[in-house]
Amino acid sequence: MATETIFALSSGRPPAAISVIRISGPGAHDAGERVGGALPEARTAVVRELRHPASGELIDEALVLRFNSPASSTGEDVVEFQCHGGRAVVDALLAALAALEGLRLAEPGEFTRRAFENGRIDLTEAEGLADLIEAETESQRKAALALAEGGLRKQIDHWQQRLLDLSAEAERSIDYDEDEFGADPAHLRECAGLAAELREWLERPRVEPLKDGVRVVVAGPPNAGKSSLLNAIAGQERAIVTAIPGTTRDHIEVPLALAGVPIVLTDTAGLRSTADPVEAIGVARAEQLVEAADVLVWLGEPGAAPDCPRLIQVHPKADLPNGGEAPAGSVPVSSVTGEGVAALLERIGEAAKSLLPAEGAVALNRRQAAHLGEAAEAVGEAAAAAELVLVAENLRRARGAFDRLTGRAGVEDVLDALFSRFCLGK
């Protein structure tokens, strides 16, 4: 890959006012000169006529920028053409580059992958860039930007330096047949402190609820008003509502945003014993969804509510005269009049926010948390180890986990999946 020169449209699809076409690789400067003439000094923009290298036909007049390795986005020689964004102009320029020997169209995410492989970014920053491209809300954008700008990488660098110092001291004690490491309580306290710090990071809210939405499940017995409530919250008829028990056979998901918090509101089949095989499947799925719920909105009797750390008890059909008095702590709601819906949404929003990272804070994804967990376990075992050789081995395990976390080792199975998330010119 390092010997190949790639090119692609790096801006949005035409038509547009301006389009950016990027070339990266050992032949980038030569290709830029053959199309745009003499290149400017590095990091300087000039206006040049762009011509087809074979026919000399004028394609466009554009800005040309040059970047020298390793001080470029990919760590390689780079040339950028900022041309007019019409389809014909872009197609003609891409065709001219494709006609040059040694150049090929980039694969999705290949520019960013080269930046990773050339040490310009680590794996956590690449994951942040992928999240930034996919961000749809302001909270998602801020969380992705914190990762893409190296927030986690800088923290990992700090942890790794502490770990390297401890490892060096342990290895030195082994080499010289000493027991200074184990005899010095400060070293063991440092191991224990580092393990506690890593565990504290693991307890922080993860990024998945922010990206995928907080799972809010509406559950209860048949005919409790679950589907009516979902329709009232969604503001449209998403679920079928009848007086016949067991109408809802499968779950219905509605993605929503509550004050900028992404949620996935799910209506479920009524929970009851049934001889109907189709309804029984729906009930089983409802039970699974209840178990996996981040927030559970319960429309049944309070004593029958499933265990959930974020349970919201709803007193439905509050507009009916025979509805009875709302139990203490419950939210009286009427899907017909709208009574209590705003209060319920406020309760749901508060519960959902508790699962999300702080605004702009670095949040771990599952892969990162798994490797950080490995490091925390290894450092904790090093602090408790009775023999110096076990201390050193556990510290080596922790260093390996950090290397997998940053992409320095053992992540080949992750890279293809990650970089396929990027667009063609990124």
Image: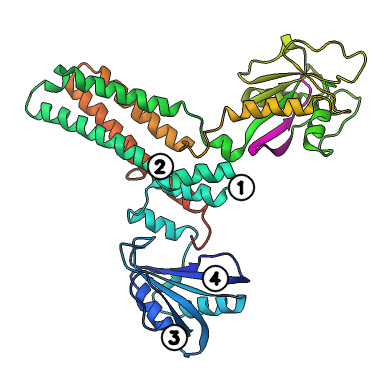
Q: Is residue 278 visible?
A: no
Residue lying at 63% horizontally and 18% vertically, measured from the top left: 308
Which of label 3 and label 1 is nearer to you? 1
Q: Could you say which disc has been placed on residue 53 in the image? A: 3
Q: Position of residue 189 (x, y in %)?
A: 25, 20
Q: Could you say which disc has been placed on residue 19 in the image? A: 4
Residue lying at 67% horizontally and 37% vertically, measured from the top left: 259
What amino acid is at disc 2?
Gly
CB atoms of marks 3 and 2 within 8 Å: no
What amino acid is at disc 3?
Pro
Does residue 81 lie above or below 136 as drawn? below
Does residue 128 lie above or below 197 as drawn? below
Left or right: residue 103 compared with residue 316: left
What amino acid is at disc 1?
Glu
Q: Position of residue 161 (x, y in %)?
A: 25, 36
Q: CA distance from mark 2 to mark 4?
A: 31 Å
Residue lying at 46% horizontally and 43% vertically, measured from the top left: 146
Decide which of tag 1 and tag 4 comes sooner along the chain.
4
Does residue 61 lie above or below 305 as drawn? below
Left or right: residue 146 compared with residue 294: left
Q: Which residues are magenta?
A: 253-271
Query: What colour-coding does the image apply?
Result: rainbow
Residue tagged by mark 2?
A: 151
Q: CA distance from mark 3 to mark 1?
A: 41 Å
Quarter of the image for the N terminus: give it: bottom left
Q: Position of residue 63 (x, y in %)?
A: 47, 76
Task: Please rate how many residues cluster around mark 4, counting C-alpha atoms within 10 Å: few if below 14, some from 14 to 19, many from 20.
Answer: many
- Secondary structure found at label 1: loop
Task: Please rate how many residues cluster around mark 1, counting C-alpha atoms within 10 Å: few if below 14, some from 14 to 19, many from 20.
Answer: few
Q: CA distance from mark 3 to mark 2?
A: 44 Å
The answer to which of 324 and 25 lies nearer the viewer is 324
